[in-house]
Amino acid sequence: MASSLQNLSDYNPTTVPSGRGKKFGIAVAEWNQHITFALRDACIDTLIENGVKKEDIIVYTVPGTFELPYIAKKLARDNHVAAVICIGCVIKGETTHNDVINHSVAHALQDLNISMDIPFVFGVLTPNTEQQAIDRAGGQFGNKGVEAAVTALKMAVL
Ligand code: DLZ
């Protein structure tokens, strides 16, 4: 379903496992930080709302979305986390950089999902326009950071 047909911030709390006692990692890109930091903050709030202690959320920041898989792997290796949430925003521009970054990051994170023992969540926005990103970072279609946190909480108990 397109995110324009559902609100990314809507979830049924009764279907979300508690994160009490668990640690979570968040890797966030600085590029488009007016978007990514809004996703990060909503992600943190949602984890806390669902029982995770603030001190059990480890946040690493990297320059761009392309760097997310490297730091996500390091975060998983160096900390006893139940899941790593990767947050970025690659906006389509005049060149094909967005295709290159989005595909490589998606593949790298999927490889980590298969090769490591914890889940890695794809919290990367891939919009065609900045407005589409704003709409999904706390705007009219909610906040993808909430969706990413809920996904991590659900995956962490599987
Ligand atoms: C270079 C670049 C460009 C053009 N656009 C974005 C973007 O929209 N979002 C993002 O997260 N990062 C972008 N980057 C930076 C790359 O992710 C990466 O940081 C650099 O290519 C250095 O490896």
Image (cartoon, rainbow, N blue to C red):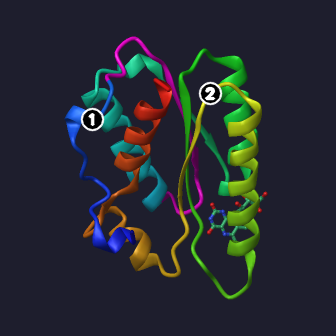
Q: Nearer the viewer, mark 2 or mark 1?
A: 1
Quickly name the residue at label 1: 15
Image vertical order of residue 154 relative to residue 136, above or below: above
Q: Is residue 71 visible?
A: no
Circle 2: element type? loop
Q: Quadrant of ligand 1?
A: bottom right
| Left or right: where 54 falls relative to 6 | right
Task: Please tell me which residue is depicted at 33% across the width and 74% down the height of the picture.
Answer: 4
Of pointers 2 and 1, the one earlier in the residue sequence = 1
How crowded pointer 2 is (Cα within 10 Å; few <14, some 14-19, many 20+) is rated as many
Look at the image and give the residue range highlighted in magenta. Answer: 18-33
How crowded pointer 1 is (Cα within 10 Å; few <14, some 14-19, many 20+) is rated as few
Q: Quadrant of residue 139?
A: bottom left
Quickly name the residue at label 2: 118
Image vertical order of residue 39 relative to residue 153, above or below: below
Task: Please tell me which residue is depicted at 42% across the width and 17% down the height of the picture.
Answer: 55
Q: Quadrant of the N terminus?
A: bottom left
| Left or right: where 144 falls relative to 102 | left
Task: Please tell me which residue is depicted at 46% across the width and 23% down the height of the picture.
Answer: 157
Question: Residue 120, image x and y in percent?
Answer: 60, 38
Question: Residue 28, image x and y in percent?
Answer: 56, 45
Task: Please tell me which residue is depicted at 55% across the width and 29% down the height of the picture.
Answer: 83
User: Looking at the picture, which amino acid does disc 1 mark?
Assistant: Thr
